[in-house]
């Protein structure tokens, strides 16, 4: 049972239970404090709301459809819906947040944007809004991710962004985030850092969740229209840092009848040494400015994560998700690389939708949920699979 007295929204000091806060170097304090003191007032301005809503409608293409997956539903003898974030402009949910943050940055008087990206979806979404608003854009991306996500790198460059390779550590998302934070420290006055997930120092986890919450807001109204009941039995989403899951869960956090199912990347297997299943492998720690669950050694060194999906190989998890895990409000499962690949091909061939590798992890747990004929399951289809075609082609070539 969920304690009715628990709030799953952020506290005034930036915490979800024991998780969150702002653990930052002194040089970053003015930036973070300016943002913390102003973001709620800025977002609440009628002029901001009007501009944001218009961009979501006319530029992003919202509302995104809620699609009944008839053949998949028949297979599991239940009712499965896809929230089609893959149909957003740029091909994933990430643009919901970048549109919001670029409007905040404008109102803070910033003229330069830095961002980190893993799979490249957030990088593309950031480059897109910078082009729209005429702002300079620098995206930090792990050197390994640049190799495996070449189409998104090309998109960012075509949109006018400078893509900088992170060559340190594992050369993936964690290292790109480190480089972006360093860049922000070096030019704090004119630069805004658009974080792409519900991670980082407060107020970022809350601000990103608010901008992504449009996903679950639409889910509720669409379910009401289709079924006469705005509450599903399950909401399922993949989790790296956790922005699409935060958006999909947001308006159901205090609805105990709705099971919130988060799916992490198990890589070669949770305990294989090549995994990114943070809740299973992590302990309490500080990563990228907030307290959360972190994959780390006994002396606090961050463990390199692994996932076939560039968007999920992150050694931490957003503080909201850490709290959902520890409070047992969320159910945290995982899917291996192999399971995710199988699901990507299965969904493509049964529903005619090629999902991103990240999203494919979410589909992998459907057989594990013990679904009933009366259940209503919404899977957040967070992104499309164009960017992963090279990986999918390798799989197909290996089977020839």
Image (cartoon, helix red, strand yellow):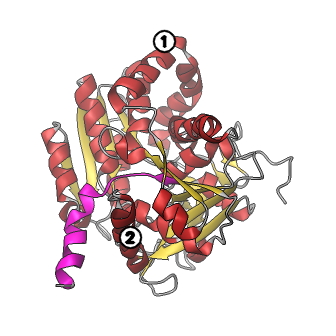
**Horizontally, is 246 left or right of 174 in the view?**
right
Q: CA distance from mark 1 to mark 2?
A: 45 Å
Work out whether residue 261 or residue 346 is closer to the camera in this orientation and state it: 346
Secondary structure, mark 1, is helix
Quadrant of residue 279 within the rendered picture: bottom right
What label does residue 47 carry, if any?
1
Where is residue 183? Give x, y as percent: 31, 45
Q: Which residue is mark 2?
A: 346
Question: Range of the magenta residues?
Answer: 379-398
Q: Is residue 388 magenta?
A: yes
| Residue at far top of view | 47
What label does residue 212 carry, if any?
none
Residue drawn at (60%, 39%), measured in percent from left and top?
Answer: 226
Residue drawn at (54%, 15%), measured in percent from left and top?
Answer: 45
Quadrant of the rendering where the C terminus is positioned: bottom left
Disc 2 packing (10 Å; few <14; some 14–19; many ≥20) = some
């Amino acid at each position: 049972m969920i304690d009715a007295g628990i709030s799953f929204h952020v506290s005034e000091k930036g915490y979800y239970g024991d998780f969150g806060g702002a653990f930052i170097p002194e040089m970053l304090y003015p930036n973070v404090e300016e943002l913390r003191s102003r973001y709620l007032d800025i977002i609440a301005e009628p002029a901001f709301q009007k501009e944001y809503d218009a961009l979501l409608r006319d530029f992003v293409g919202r509302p995104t459809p809620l699609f009944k997956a008839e053949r998949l539903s028949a297979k599991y003898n239940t009712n499965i819906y896809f929230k089609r974030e893959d149909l957003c402009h740029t091909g994933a949910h990430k643009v919901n947040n970048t549109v919001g943050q670029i409007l905040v940055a404008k109102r803070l008087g910033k003229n330069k944007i830095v961002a980190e990206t893993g799979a490249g979806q957030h990088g593309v979404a950031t480059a897109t809004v910078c082009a729209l608003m005429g702002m300079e854009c620098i995206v930090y991306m792990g050197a390994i991710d640049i190799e495996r996500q070449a189409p998104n790198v090309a998109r960012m460059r075509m949109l006018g962004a400078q893509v900088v390779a992170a060559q340190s550590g594992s050369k993936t998302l964690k290292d790109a985030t480190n480089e972006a934070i360093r860049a922000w420290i070096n030019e704090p006055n004119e630069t805004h850092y658009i974080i792409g997930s519900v991670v980082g120092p407060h107020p970022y986890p809350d601000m990103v969740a608010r901008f992504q919450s449009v996903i679950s807001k639409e889910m509720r109204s669409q379910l009401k229209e289709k079924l006469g009941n705005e509450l599903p039995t399950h909401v399922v989403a993949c989790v790296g840092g956790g922005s699409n899951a935060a958006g999909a869960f947001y308006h159901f956090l205090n609805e105990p009848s709705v099971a919130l199912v988060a799916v992490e990347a198990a890589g070669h297997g949770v305990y294989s040494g090549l995994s990114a299943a943070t809740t299973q492998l992590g302990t309490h720690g500080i990563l990228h400015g907030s307290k959360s669950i972190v994959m780390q050694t006994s002396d606090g060194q961050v463990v390199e994560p692994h996932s076939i999906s560039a968007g999920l190989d992150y050694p931490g998890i957003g503080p909201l998700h850490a709290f959902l895990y520890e409070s047992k409000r969320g159910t945290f499962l995982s899917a291996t690389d192999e399971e995710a690949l199988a699901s990507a091909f299965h969904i493509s061939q049964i529903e005619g939708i090629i999902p991103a590798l990240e999203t494919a992890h979410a589909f992998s747990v459907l057989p594990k949920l013990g679904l009933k004929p009366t259940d209503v399951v919404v899977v957040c289809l967070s992104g499309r699979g164009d960017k992963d075609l090279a990986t999918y082609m390798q799989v197909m070539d290996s089977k020839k």
